[in-house]
Amino acid sequence: MSLSADLPLVLSSIPSPGQWGRQYRLYGIMIALGVIFGLELARRRWANRGGNPEDMSSIALWAVPAGLIGARLYHVITDNELYRGHWFDNPLPSAGGNSPLAIWQGGLGIPGGIAAGVAVGVWVARKKGIRLGPGLDTVAPALALAQAIGRWGNYFNIELYGSTTTLPWGLDVPMGTPGRPPLEPATTLFHPTFLYESLWNVGLVLLLIWIDSKRVLRPGRIFALYIGGYFLGRLWVEALRVDFANTILGLRVNTWMSLVAIAGVLVFLLIAGLKRRPGDSDAPYRDGHTWDPQGAIVPAAPEGEPETDSEGALDLAGAVSTTTRTAAGSGAAEGGTRARAARREASASAPTSKSGSASGSPAARRAPDGTDHPDHATAPDGSGTAGDPGASGTTPGDAGGAAQRASGGGDAKLEP
């Protein structure tokens, strides 16, 4: 067949990826790419809110594995008949079994992934002091982006397609593909429901980011809109799918989950409110601090208290003042001790007259002109010396000089 004859067929449908999608495990690769791009979006959004982007990486280390486990458990529980008799099959690809652990074969339920991943993420965020509302609003568009990319894994596994269609973007599903209606001709095309959901999620990402930029909603409401918006899209996508699924009262299980999630969001918004109120805060952390792009933490200054720099100056001044007072007190005490010792020494070595020695009273000193020193003149009543500070034989000048020498001052001489 010529190229001109094949071209209209190629352009009028989405070709099947064949078996090479499963061969090269592109299902898992697309999920990994979704995680990488979603995490990067969350990191940037968190930094724009004043949070440390490394917080998002730390949360992802716990939330992503929890989300994968939760998604697999949801699938296995809601489609458990697919694994009956195969619970203990060898999960290795070479075994060719149908083990519940063979996650690369497909089978991840997004509702379970959201529930488990968000629960673990909230637990880690609380340990880091992150405010719940701003944190959830940050990751909401990131989760939608990860789902938009990860849905292409269903394309490479040739799964998650809908009913027949004649639209030019119909999906070519080879004969013998699991879930394909066996009576449909080989040329029949099917709705690419994986593509519909992926595009819906891309639109949801853009819508959530735009609404969030307006800051007109209360903290946490962007995440609520993500839940409601995602399951609203899932509701009509499920209506197009024809692959096997368990039903309750004639509706697919995922349809019921979508209805419950939408109803829950509506009730929450009616009770808690949607529009922003006075006092609502977008601060990233419970203690009010923010993260600086240079890697520094900027604390929130309590109302009525000095800012961080002046607080530090006051603390430093207080410490210096306390140290100075302590040192001064210690020096004064030490100086006083040395002064008392010097007075005792001076008392023991002071010269006395014979009469003073005999009577035990201090002798009067002679000045160079031959007169008595006024400090040691005999008192009128003869009982002591006038100006004697304590009958120690030491003048005030003597004690002062001794004290000065003991405390490290200049030399002072005793009176001759």
Image (cartoon, rainbow, N blue to C red):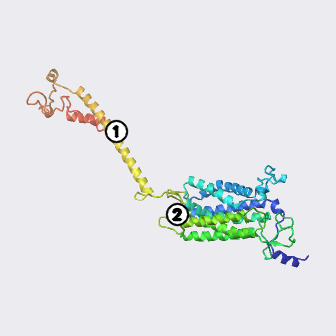
| Precedes in sequence: disc 1 or disc 2 | 2
Q: Which of the two residues, 90 or 366, is positioned nearer the viewer here?
A: 90
What x and y, as percent, mark residue 237?
72, 69
Given contact means CB atoms under 8 Å apart, are the residues at marks 1 and 2 in contact?
no
Task: Give the residue furthest to the right.
Answer: 1
What x and y, as percent, mark residue 96?
84, 54
**338 with respect to 5 (left or right):** left
Q: Secondary structure at mark 1?
A: helix
**405 with respect to 385 (left or right):** right
Quadrant that contains the N terminus: bottom right
Q: Please tell me in which quadrant of the rendered image residue 64 appears.
A: bottom right
Q: Label 2 sits on what residue type?
A: Asp
Quadrant that contains the C terminus: top left
Identify whether 356 is placed above or below 134. Answer: above
Q: Residue at x 68, y 54 (%)?
A: 65
Query: Which disc is residue 282 wearing?
Result: 2
Q: What residue is pinned by disc 1?
A: 330
Q: Please tell me in which quadrant of the rendered image residue 40 appears.
A: bottom right
Q: Label 1 sits on what residue type?
A: Ser
Q: Which of the two residues, 67 or 338, is positioned nearer the viewer here?
A: 67
Task: Give the residue furthest to the top.
Answer: 358
Query: Is residue 293 shown to the viewer in this render?
Result: no
Q: Secondary structure at mark 2?
A: loop
Q: Please tell me in which quadrant of the rendered image residue 171 appears.
A: bottom right
Q: Which of the two residues, 125 or 318, is positioned nearer the viewer here?
A: 125
**377 with respect to 149 (left or right):** left
Disc 1 to disc 2, C-alpha distance: 53 Å
**123 with respect to 234 (left or right):** left
What x and y, as percent, mark residue 297?
52, 56
Q: Residue at x 31, y 36 (%)?
A: 335
